[in-house]
Image (spheres, rainbow, N blue to C red):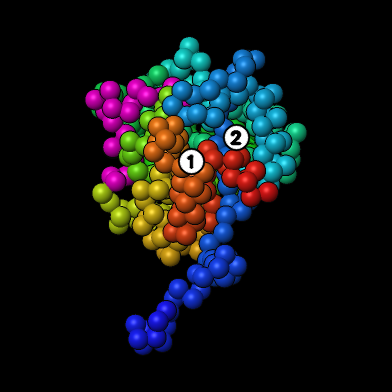
């Protein structure tokens, strides 16, 4: 810097960015393998892993392969997995009856994983969409004009108890019915599962980013082809205050974790809730966020590894303590 051009500055923030060592010293956010929860899809029978077309690198696994995958994740330092069933369409009906089958796919999967890896935390979804023929998260009213809130909550409570019996550490209601956290807490306690935690999908938005997931579990029907959309229960993406209200209610009703979903387009909500609650905040980087990054990388338009890292760093910086992400394994490998 020639002295005649020198500005009279007291502070020069660039001083701390001069070398890689200095930049590392002042870095505020760090990703660790234990930040991630890996969502995994499970199928019945013994099929070979089936890749989900819109989610490169994500497979539906049979129970044996699921256990193998869980072991690999655990070795890499990931502490939790979230399991989602892909049900045979023959088992689906309007009431989602298969959700309460005591020998159902997800319960068998939970038992297998917990038996092989007792230390790995298992999270299960509490919602009816993988089980209903119409793809909604609950059962419908008599005239099928809406999801019946209170009847759905009763079923979800039973579902949560079955999952607790199978050994899950955390049940995660993703249905967005009113009052479900309180009802599920009460049901768990009444059945002696006071130690089973609840991760509430508190701020779950009615998002177009769930598209690839609905392909993965076969619940696409309710996404828009139906006259009845999920907009009557999932949050309007335009609403911030309503998200805060939902989280406050879930906390009052006994939620142990508060979740925001999707993550990347809702960083403001993550920050709001991180500041509003003392509970751990989880954020779900959903299927569409994952697919978008892969698609752009495939076209050669974005750098997969860099965008992956930046997207997750942003979610953590916004305030997420935990991130559900399909990149969990890739990231854990990288960070190990
Ligand atoms: C529904 C559920 C959805 C996801 C997790 N649980 C989709 C929906 O509401 O239709 C989406 C996850 C993802 O997109 O990765 N219970």
User: Residue 249 occupies which quadrant of the picture?
Assistant: bottom left
Q: Residue at x 54, y 40 (%)?
A: 327
Q: Could one spot residue 9 in this view of the protein?
A: no
What is the CA distance from the residue labelled 1 to the residue labelled 2? 36 Å
- For disc 2, the neighbor class at 10 Å (few under 14, some 14 to 19, many from 20) is many
Q: Nearer the viewer, residue 277 or 98?
A: 277
Q: Give the numbered dot on residue 163.
A: 2
- For label 2, the SS is helix
Quadrant housing residue 93: top left
| Residue 301 in picture, x, y percent from top left | 39, 38
Per the rendered image, the range of residues in magenta is 216-237
> Is 288 or 136 nearer to us in this picture?
288
Residue in the foreground of this view, choosing between 27 and 269: 27
Sequence-wise, which precedes: disc 1 or disc 2? Answer: 2
- The answer to which of 4 and 33 lies nearer the viewer is 4
**Where's residue 155, x and y in %?**
47, 32
Drawn side of residue 188 relative to residue 3, left or right: right
Determine the residue positioned at 42% across, 29% down.
212
Visible residue check, residue 313: yes
The answer to whether the residues at label 1 and label 2 have Cβ atoms under 8 Å apart is: no
Q: Is the CB of the residue bearing disc 2 within 8 angstroms of ligand 1?
A: no
Residue 59, percent across and down?
56, 26
Q: As drawn, is 162 to the left or to the right of 206? A: right
Q: Which image quarter holds the N terminus? A: bottom left
Which residue is rendered at x = 55% and y = 68% of the image? 19
Tell whether 197 sits left or right of 238: right
Query: Quadrant of the rendered structure where residue 30 is?
Result: bottom right
Question: How many residues crowd mark 1 within 10 Å: few (<14), some (14–19), many (20+)?
Answer: some
At mark 1, the secondary structure is helix
Which numbered tag is attached to residue 304?
Answer: 1
Horizontal placement of 150 versus 119: left or right?
Answer: left
Residue located at (52% from left, 43% from top): 305
């Amino acid at each position: 810097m020639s002295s005649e051009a020198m500005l009279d500055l007291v502070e020069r923030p660039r001083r701390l960015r001069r070398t890689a060592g200095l930049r590392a010293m002042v870095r505020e956010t760090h990703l660790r393998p234990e930040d991630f929860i890996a969502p995994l899809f499970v199928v019945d029978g013994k099929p070979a892993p089936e890749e989900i077309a819109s989610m490169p690198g994500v497979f539906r696994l049979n129970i044996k392969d699921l256990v193998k995958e869980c072991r690999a994740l655990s070795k890499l330092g990931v502490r939790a997995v979230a399991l989602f069933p892909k049900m045979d369409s023959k088992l689906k009906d309007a009431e989602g009856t298969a959700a309460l089958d005591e020998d159902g796919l997800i319960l068998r999967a939970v038992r297998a994983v917990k038996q092989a890896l007792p230390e790995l935390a298992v999270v299960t979804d509490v919602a009816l969409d993988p089980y209903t023929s119409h793809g909604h998260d609950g059962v419908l009213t008599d005239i099928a004009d809406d999801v019946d809130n209170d009847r759905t909550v009763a079923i979800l409570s039973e579902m949560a108890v079955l999952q607790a019996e199978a050994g899950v550490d955390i049940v995660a209601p993703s249905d967005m019915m009113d009052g479900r956290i309180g009802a599920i807490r009460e049901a768990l306690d009444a059945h002696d599962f006071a130690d089973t935690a609840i991760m509430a999908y508190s701020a779950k938005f009615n998002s177009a980013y769930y598209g690839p997931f609905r392909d993965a579990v076969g619940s696409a029907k309710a996404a828009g082809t139906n006259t009845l959309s999920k907009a009557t229960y999932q949050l309007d993406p335009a609403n911030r205050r309503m998200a805060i209200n939902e989280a406050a209610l879930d906390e009052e009703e006994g939620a142990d974790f508060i979740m925001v979903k999707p993550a990347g387009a809702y960083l403001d909500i993550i920050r709001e809730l991180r500041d509003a609650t003392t509970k751990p905040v989880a954020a779900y980087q959903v299927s569409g966020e994952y697919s978008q990054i892969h698609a752009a990388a495939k076209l050669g338009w974005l750098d997969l590894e860099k965008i992956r890292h930046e997207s997750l760093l942003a979610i953590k910086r916004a305030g997420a303590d935990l991130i559900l992400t399909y990149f969990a394994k890739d990231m854990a490998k990288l960070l190990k």
